[in-house]
Image (cartoon, coloured by chain):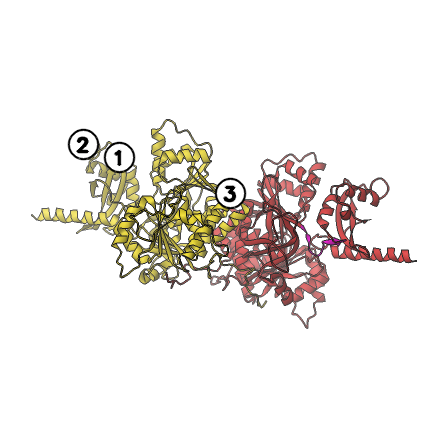
Chain colours: A red, B yellow
Amino acid sequence: MNGGFMQCSANYMPLSPISFLERAAVVNGEKPSVVYGGIRFSWKETHQRCLNFASALVRLGISRHDVVAAIAPNIPALYELHFSVPMAGAILCALNIRLDSPTLSLILQQLEAKVILVDYQYLQVVLQALEKLSPKICKPPLLILIPECDQLSSNGTIDHDLPPGSLNYNDLQGSTAEPDFEIRRPLNECDPISVNYTSGSTGNPKGVVYSHRATYLNSLGAIFQSEMAKMPVFLWTVDMFRCNGWCFPWAVAALGGTNIFLRENHSAKLIFEAIDLHKVIHLCGSPCILNILAHHASKSDQIRPLKSTVNILVAGALPPPQILNQVAKLGFNVSHGYGMTEALGPAIVTPCKPELKSQYNLMMEGVDVKDPSTMESVPYDGKTMGEIMFRGNTLMLGYLKNSKAMIEPFQGGWYRTGDLAIRHSDGYIQMKDRARDMIISGGEAISTLEVEAVLLTHPCVLEAAVVGRNDDCLGKTPCAFVKLKEGFCSGGNSSTSEEIMKFCGEKLPAYMVPKAVVFGDLPLNSTGKIQKFVLREKANKQVCAETTMLHE
Amino acid sequence: MNGGFMQCSANYMPLSPISFLERAAVVNGEKPSVVYGGIRFSWKETHQRCLNFASALVRLGISRHDVVAAIAPNIPALYELHFSVPMAGAILCALNIRLDSPTLSLILQQLEAKVILVDYQYLQVVLQALEKLSPKICKPPLLILIPECDQLSSNGTIDHDLPPGSLNYNDLQGSTAEPDFEIRRPLNECDPISVNYTSGSTGNPKGVVYSHRATYLNSLGAIFQSEMAKMPVFLWTVDMFRCNGWCFPWAVAALGGTNIFLRENHSAKLIFEAIDLHKVIHLCGSPCILNILAHHASKSDQIRPLKSTVNILVAGALPPPQILNQVAKLGFNVSHGYGMTEALGPAIVTPCKPELKSQYNLMMEGVDVKDPSTMESVPYDGKTMGEIMFRGNTLMLGYLKNSKAMIEPFQGGWYRTGDLAIRHSDGYIQMKDRARDMIISGGEAISTLEVEAVLLTHPCVLEAAVVGRNDDCLGKTPCAFVKLKEGFCSGGNSSTSEEIMKFCGEKLPAYMVPKAVVFGDLPLNSTGKIQKFVLREKANKQVCAETTMLHE
């Protein structure tokens, strides 16, 4: 057959998650979209509010592909921005609320954001960051303050500590969209829709750019993965500034579901109350959410098992099995995701039930473990190590203004995760470690994750991180950094370095047992990840000190 | 932000349902894909079989965009062709098994099919059709016979009534794919993947061409619509030659589900047995499936209510409420789809529960009721009539070799369905009639569907169709064609024209009551649709006869 078929506006439209909101306004118009304390919106209202703000952005002079930044916790305004900013043709950058002002300033400079929306709680840090901006390099963005959403509009009086010309989100919501406002749909579905900054476990945050196509498809992937039915009740415990809340702002709209927002989204009390009150079916987050729930439940007599199953998907290192068991007993159905900002969030999900296999994202076309130099797949032998690689439509476009970093991870036609894994005969991919964290000791590869997993089963250990420390003879040896649980202290009543090494020695081959244990708090970055590069420095300074002592 | 982002083979792959099979072979490799009598395949096996046949097609000289036709009931081979044909870069045309040899010959000529796969039951009609092909216009396709799938291969002996060179599907499956065979993925995701012939209620079948992109997205849409969880058990009661089984061959692969096949897929006994034996969760079909199930259940003492809910999606005119009630009582959860071949199947689905609203396909970007000349949307007033129009990514590419028919339906940037509807204040779209079936009588528009719905509530009426008949005074008047249930006959013990008109008069305004009632069988086309154009001719011949009689 010789084609000659044409795509026209009837049978081809660029894929964009904007469509999900438009459909929800028609199909689920009267159903609740947003619940936040006493605030409730319907899908018709949310659609209208997004139109209002998109129209306001255009009126303010925002052009296609301008960046609109926002710093806010999980509140309705940040949800709305996931639609209104793309509807104005612009690119959303939701910033981590835990950033300090120097980092924030650096990021704003790189973004060249035209507008920054600021939740009132984060005003001070933003004002400090704006002061640090060099006006020569970058015109400061227009500031739009987000008050609580039930607050009256400012009536034109803006706090006098705000930069002149600043505006108020509620004021802008007060005027409805221009009647002739037309949504600026993407001209090409691969146009950018958002930037998400990686926490940067290397200490160097990168702006990861997503496309309309990738987020549209990943929203569908997220729905499949979690087997969400129509009109789910979704509790926002995953931060929306993390991989755009893994695409769930758009996924919930696609299903005409209800978004439950909590300003304090890590309060176990509020989470349990919301589950009970709103009949929550799904929530997501980092694994610490499991610790929070288990801890609260074990302390409180009032927590009864859930009335019906609540699905939790967590992404990151899993907490120890006893926490998982506690959470499962309460009635949570836990799954564990492996992914990264570059893959729009979890790309492989493993249900925490032994009878269920891990599955990769439906939209991910290829998931492989390869030798990074030859690009050959490693055998399914349960021992040969390779790098986990992805290819598919749910990967980033690239890094913002970082052409070197942009080409490297896609070399060879696959996205190189930098994570090392083996493949078992049944196809199961077992992650061993980040490539840069893996310790080669006397020729043996040591997965720091495996050593950490053993440390976390020690009754006194709350947190643990293992890094390599230079060794003249073996190259590197494992060095453990350990934070003990409340009520325990090193030495005294509980744990000594020797005791912990002995504990590990009973469960690990000798070469994997830490040769040093250091007690104390672990350095975390703004997204709560342990900064191993800080610990590596610390471990090696210690070696130097010891060596110096020896030489003295 | 200025882009400069590139799509590469890592982060951009043309959307194609081929991917679903590849993923199922990895993620659900050992799970059952196909059950057909005693035959069972796993997803790994189905994947391998599709590779084998794709490789065979390439070996036989099939090029990109060649057409491979098939005529078979719902058997595993036809399922496999939904993957293997596109994997060879070719276009699948699954043909209606009820076509007669002249129509089949016409279609084969238009298709210029290079290969035709023929289930053994349909060999005679195909041989007759091939004889009719004009060798000057069209080189006859290579015939590949499909024996029962557990039959041994032919050992090279081919029936001597087959054209020389004919092959056997089981033989070709006997040799595995060449080790260097590479799947011919679409170069562009808008490349064609299949052709589906419309039944043509106007009597003029058209080849509707689907793209890889549209079928990929519509498979996802079908999953959403039916809220299918992972690994569903799907019973094949909808014919795969109808809109590619509404994309379910691909949807079930995406979910790693199990396909249950029945050669006799309209046998109520076999359907109930399969539901019980395989724990079927979903089935689809034309509404006659509801009649079949209700009828069988009312006759048989052995049919108990289902052990668990089975979801049925039917597309076409709904049967009367008493049938729906009977089926619901058995434990079926019925939804009703409105759509057409051009929209890849049902585009709007209404659950048969009063509390649930109708929803349009998640992938359909626009659903509207418009004045076909001004293209203005009609008001939500429950009375202004307009034409139902669609736009979105789940519409056909166009009609095969029919450039006039190709441009017309997409004029104005919307797909014009030819169906008339009104919109209610809550957004509900109520279909009134096919544009060409609507009767204008004395200035009033009469929906033939509404009159038929009333006729079907008459206790003696099995089938009914209403068409317009010329009238000197009123323009047209409704004329009803009625088939009575078994045991009833017109006149005698049950129904006369007068009695039926009186029945209608009690439920309809006078102008909508049929002015003539004709008893007898209704003319059906190959897909079971009533051929109204035949009835219109018949009705008007009758008027002529009556007029002649009057003049005599």
Give the image location of residue B336, x and y in percent.
39, 43
The image quadrant where one finds the N terminus of chain A is bottom left
Name the residue carrying label 2: B492
Give the image location of residue A537, x and y in percent.
79, 58
Q: Amino acid at mark 1?
A: Lys
Asked if the stretch drawn in magenta spans residue A434, the answer is: yes
Q: Is residue B435 left or right of residue A526?
A: left
Q: Is residue A493 above or below residue B70?
A: above
Q: Which mark is residue B485?
A: 1
Asked if the stretch drawn in magenta spans residue A496, the answer is: no
Instruction: Using a 10 Å C-alpha cutoff, classify the residue at mark 1 as few (fewer than 14 neighbours), some (14 to 19) or many (20 or more).
Output: few
Instruction: Using a 10 Å C-alpha cutoff, classify the residue at mark 3 as few (fewer than 14 neighbours), some (14 to 19) or many (20 or more).
Output: some
Q: Amino acid at mark 3?
A: Ala
Residue at 83% x, 40% y is A494
**Can residue A111 be seen at all in this image of the molecule?**
yes
Of residues B467 and B120, the one nearer the viewer is B120
The quadrant in which residue B335 appears is top left
Mark 1 or 3: in front is 3
State which region is magenta.
A432-442
Name the residue carrying label 3: B229
State how far apart marks 1 and 3 are (Cα): 40 Å
Give the image location of residue B514, x and y in percent.
23, 43
SS assignment at label 3: loop
Q: Amino acid at mark 2?
A: Gly
SS assignment at label 1: loop
SS assignment at label 2: loop
| Identity of the residue furthest to the top in this view | B301
Mark 3 or 2: in front is 3
| Identity of the residue furthest to the bottom in this view | A136
The answer to whether marks 1 and 3 sit on the same chain is: yes
